[in-house]
Image (cartoon, helix red, strand yellow):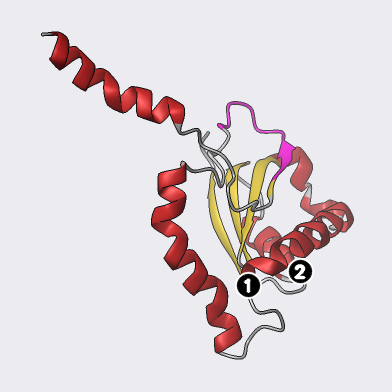
Amino acid sequence: MLTLAVLIALPAATRAADPRINRGNDPFLHVSSAVAGCSAPRGPVETEQEWLDEAHYRIERGNSCWIAGRCRLSNSYDYDKEIAESVTRRLNSLNASLQWRERTSLWLTIQRRFIYLDGCVAQDFDISGFVSALGETADVEKVIDRTTRRP
């Protein structure tokens, strides 16, 4: 009986010893919080084992644009900090008619020149206009909209 209890508790103890952290230092920005009841996404956090499992794939994805001749930097993840700074400036200067701060609860994750947009938006919010404006940020390859209209 004791052995069974130890075996059941072992996976939980392993999870507690392996915290989820942002191992790739991917920018994760909370940019608005106007929609009540919108849950925060997990963000770019993972356990060490998840990080190791993804390492080869991450290296491959990071280098592919350089190999294809589409990037000026040798790894697409090297753009992320610069994109985070640029997108913050862009958000601060976006047209007031979008009312994005007043009508959204949003988080941005930036990984390998992609912006992942998570969170909640008002029913009549112009999400396509907002996504388009984010996509105009220098060096952004794609904006992936994962927002919901129902928190």
Q: Position of residue 35 (x, y in %)?
A: 65, 33
Compute the Cα span from label 2 to label 1: 15 Å
**Residue pictured at 75% horizontal, 63% vertical:** 83
**Residue pictured at 84% horizontal, 57% vertical:** 94
- In this figure, which residue is indicated by the disc labeled 2? 137
Q: Label 1 sits on what residue type?
A: Ser
Residue at the far bottom in the pictured view: 69
Q: Quadrant of the N terminus?
A: top left
Residue at the far left in the pictured view: 1
Q: Is residue 1 visible?
A: yes
Graded by Cα atoms within 10 Å as few (under 14), some (14 to 19) or many (20 or more), the crowding at tag 1 reads many
Which span is picked out in magenta?
29-39
Which one is nearer the viewer's eye here, 49 or 134? 49
Q: Position of residue 46 (x, y in %)?
A: 49, 43
Which one is nearer the viewer's eye here, 118 or 62? 62
**Residue pictured at 43% horizontal, 66% vertical:** 56
Which one is nearer the viewer's eye here, 42 or 151? 42
Label 2: state its secondary structure: loop
Graded by Cα atoms within 10 Å as few (under 14), some (14 to 19) or many (20 or more), the crowding at tag 2 reads some
On residue 76, the disc is 1
| In magenta segment, residue 32 | yes
Q: Position of residue 109 (x, y in %)?
A: 62, 52
Residue 68, placed above or below residue 47: below
| In magenta segment, residue 146 | no
Residue 11, placed above or below residue 60: above
**Residue pictured at 59% horizontal, 44% vertical:** 22
Residue 64, placed above or below residue 68: above
